[in-house]
Amino acid sequence: MISQRINSISYAIREIAAIADKVAKSGKKIYHLNIGDPVIYDFNTPHYISQALADASFGGKNYYVNSLGAPELREELSRSINQRYNLKVSSSDILVTTGVTEAIFFLIAATIENKKELLIPGPSYPLYINYTKFFDGVPIEYELDENNNWEPNIDDLRKKITDKTKAILICSPNNPTGVMYSEKMIKNIIDIAGEYGLFILSDEIYDQIIFEKEFTCPATLSNDVPIIGLNGFSKTHLVTGWRLGYMYYHDPENKLNDLKEGIAKMARARLSASSIAQYAAIEILKNPGTHTQEMVAKLKERRDYSLNRLRKIEGITCVEANGAFYLFPKFDFAELKKWKNDKEFVIDFLKTTGVCTVYGSGFGEYGNNHVRFTFLPKVEILEIVYNLLEDFIK
């Protein structure tokens, strides 16, 4: 017998991977466009970064570090964040976590209980929905408007605020749409948060994987509304398996002191994030290299190719992604009469062709009738995938 809170967890990204494993056992080649992990494609971890990890281990850093993060890393993160975003975040405002996943867990655990509500973008990364429910809260999705380049529907966001709302999540660039909020829209959300006395969670894990537009950091735009930024090394620096993230507090009026101390207690209870990964990350911050820019250049070519192919297929429309490495096309199942919904389509597509994508309904109610594709594979692989997709739909 397991708890009800465990029964309520679903995670479409990994659940479709389990089906893909079964299909692979039948001998069919699998084309993975489901997992947002650049390292499993042709984006290799730079040698100097792997060397920094080895040096940390051979250098004797194989012990528990401070639960809030190695002091040297927190100092370096403070310098980096302030330089990039023009902020004044001190090292004491930073907590190093086991990936952004743990930061999300800490924040929701410390904030949500007794049917309190977290306002999240729809569609959204499923973990926010899962953890909110896990802690007896209610995830409330505010609409990202596909007809307006997936910008938040500010009127919908405002009307969904209640006396149970605890915080507003901004996820930009967004997973699964790959689209960034405009600076004007982020300012509007900050103003609304201030009006209702809410704080903002800002998921910034893709802040350096951007194409035509500049990234807007919400904390840079806020004078008094508290903002907690979530970021990490996984995607940008090609170390997904290291599980190294961090959160920072931009809280000019010290409104979140109790929350900050509560989360610190949780961090102490779990000891620390990986010591050697933290010491290696100091080298990454001091010597960021060129691998991120090189990855972004490759990804832009792959995005353009994927977008062009998707838009040529009858029954599919797709908004251009300007960040991350996802496209989130909409499928007209009234026209494509063979399938009732996105989940049925994705499973049939996988079993028939070996192409593994993720059904959009796994990202919340606003994901219905969509499918998430990564454009991480090489163009030669993407060409095979979209040829298979065209034939499959025909």
Image: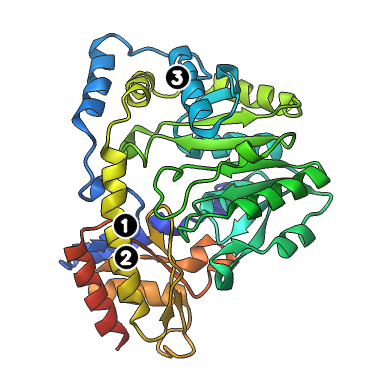
- Residue 155 x/y as whole percent: 74, 64
Q: Secondary structure at mark 1?
A: helix
Mark toward the start of the polypeptide (3 vs 1): 3
Do the residues under discs 1 and 2 have CB atoms within 8 angstroms?
A: yes
How crowded pointer 3 is (Cα within 10 Å; few <14, some 14-19, many 20+) is rated as some
- Residue 3 x/y as whole percent: 59, 47
How crowded pointer 1 is (Cα within 10 Å; few <14, some 14-19, many 20+) is rated as many
**Picture residue at 55% right of the left edge, 70% below the top:** 146
**Picture residue at 76% right of the left edge, 50% below the top:** 192
Total marks placed: 3
User: Vertical placement of 267 versus 214: above or below?
Assistant: above
- Residue 32 x/y as whole percent: 27, 60
- Disc assigned to residue 300: 1
Tell which of 388 and 290 is nearer to you: 290
* Distance between the alpha carbons at the discs numbered 3 and 1: 30 Å
**Residue farthest right in this picture:** 163
User: Vertical placement of 257 versus 327: above or below?
Assistant: above
Q: Amino acid at mark 1?
A: Lys
- Residue 265 x/y as whole percent: 63, 21
**Picture residue at 46% right of the left edge, 43% below the top:** 207
Tell which of 251 and 29 is nearer to you: 251
Q: Left or right of 47: which side holds 249?
A: right
Tell which of 331 and 202 is nearer to you: 202
User: Vertical placement of 142 versus 94: above or below?
Assistant: below
According to the picture, the residue beneath numbered tag 2 turns out to be 304
Q: Visible in this render: residue 4?
A: no
* Front tag of 3 and 1: 1
According to the picture, the residue beneath numbered tag 3 turns out to be 76
- Disc assigned to residue 59: none
